[in-house]
Amino acid sequence: MLKLNRYHIVLSMLLFACNMLMSGQDLDSLLQGYMEEKTEYTLATFKATRILNGHSIERMTEGQMDFRISHRFGRINSGAYEFFGLDQAHIHISLEYGITDWLMVGVGRGTFEKTIDGFTKLSLLRQSTGAKEMPVSLSYMAGIYMNGLKWSDPERDNHFYQRLSFAHQILIARKFSPAFSLQITPSYLHQNLVETAAEPNDIFGLGVGGRLKLSKRISFNAEYYYLFKPDNETLSTDIYNPLSLGIDIETGGHVFQVILTNSVGMRENAFLGHTTGKWLNGDIHLGFNVSRVFQLKK
Amino acid sequence: MRLRALTGMMILALAGSALGQGKYLTNEGTIVFYSHTAIEDITAENSEVASVIDTESGEVAVIVKMTDFQFEKKLMQEHFNENYVESEKYPKSTFSGLILNNQDVDYTMHGVHSVQVEGALTIHGVTNKVSAKGSVEITTEGIVAKTKFMLNPEDYGIKIPKVVRKNIADNMEIRINLKHNPI
């Protein structure tokens, strides 16, 4: 208490002295003191709701709808016959919507395993400065994925629940400067049915993603997931850690993302559980995401 | 935080006592900007503008926080702050100027007086000398200052990319309404 008093006395004296010195014209500083300190929420940690394949902490605010088309070509190393992958196409389309400023939902359809998927994303913390300071933004994402392929073995006792996979992610991001943002993404994928008994039903992953702004409307993005999974020698299909590199280009209501990735799948069930490409082998897919945002509610 | 609030109050108290009479303040003033093109109309409103008038000298000062501009489309608001005015780098715009015909305004008489204001306007880190016609209305509560003028974002180093050039007007209309109360 004593400290506080002393501080205030000294400050008062200083201020008084300053006031005497000011020729009584310094309206600007008068105003500065009069402005209320408010909470400033950090804007645009990432440009889109995806860093590249995986979610970013960005969300649709209330009444915003995002129509997304994602596309991956085949593998670049597939040779001239496949026109270096460009002959093949893998697509995912989705509609995503902000119910409130902190809750968004989405549904989608992808060619990978003819998946129908849905997700919800909750924005729990938002990075801010000013009256309320928060060093990071934190969101939680839960996804459900339904494999839509015909049963590989119709004779077997097949159940609907075997088609389902579930993913949970905690997204923690910080915008360090207007040009640089970083996110870490602890992830968990559960698949009700896997190919063989050797395959794990549960896979944990730790994602790291970031963006580096190259100009006002272009940024370089990178995203990597380290998977905690059994050795490839014990699996029937080799699985690798997904690594994606890309460029974000923003034009008004559109965000284009041009991507190089070793994952052909564009949702969590696919890139966490089924990334069979290896960068060093040249199993790289060129692809893009297009996002178009509509303001449905004003 | 409490310390800071206390300090703020002390600044106010001290400033008030030391600067004396003749100053009118607000921190709830309104600035609306309006961009009209054949393709799109864009408006944004900021109703947390801080402003002060010194009736004795005719000096005026205005401070605006750029992130307080509210757009209908939140995405547009994000683009405005991130790509156009770069609010993280230049969080505030300021105006500091003079009512040229201040001696003609009788601040003791209720009613509307037209004024000519001139001064330095700083947006996006760029300062330009501007001049505009406006009015001050003396009421029982205080002084209502109003003005309307045109502003070209390019004059303030705000570049508008070609793809949206047709959506954003060359000249924006700025409407300002500041209801000042005596200190």
Image: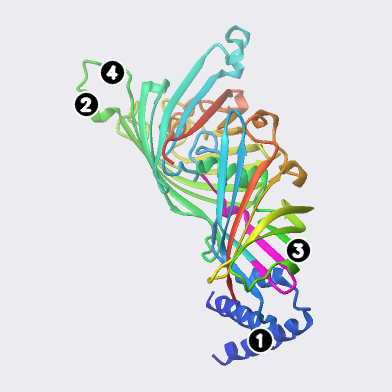
Q: Are marks 3 and 4 on the same chain?
A: no
Nearer the observer: mark 3 or 1; the answer is 3
> Pointer 1: residues within 10 angstroms few (<14), some, or many (20+)?
some
Gap in angstroms between the C-alphas marked 4 and 2? 10 Å
The dot on residue A151 is: 4
> Pointer 4: residues within 10 angstroms few (<14), some, or many (20+)?
few
Q: Are marks 3 and 1 in contact (CB under 8 Å)?
A: no
Gap in angstroms between the C-alphas marked 1 and 4? 79 Å
Gap in angstroms between the C-alphas marked 2 and 3? 85 Å
Residue placed under numbered mark 1 in the picture: A12
* Amino acid residing under circle 1: Ser
Asked if residue B126 can be seen in this view, the reply is: no
Disc 3, SS: loop
* Relative vertical location of residue B121 with respect to residue A1 in this rendering, above or below: above
Chain of residue at mark 2: A
* Amino acid residing under circle 2: His
Quadrant location of the N terminus of chain A in the rendered image: bottom right
Q: Which residue is drawn at 69% across and 72% down?
A: B55
Q: Are marks 2 and 1 on the same chain?
A: yes
Residue placed under numbered mark 2 in the picture: A159
Chain of residue at mark 4: A
Residue placed under numbered mark 3 in the picture: B101
Quadrant location of the C terminus of chain A in the rendered image: top left
Disc 2, SS: loop
Magenta stretch: give its range. B52-71
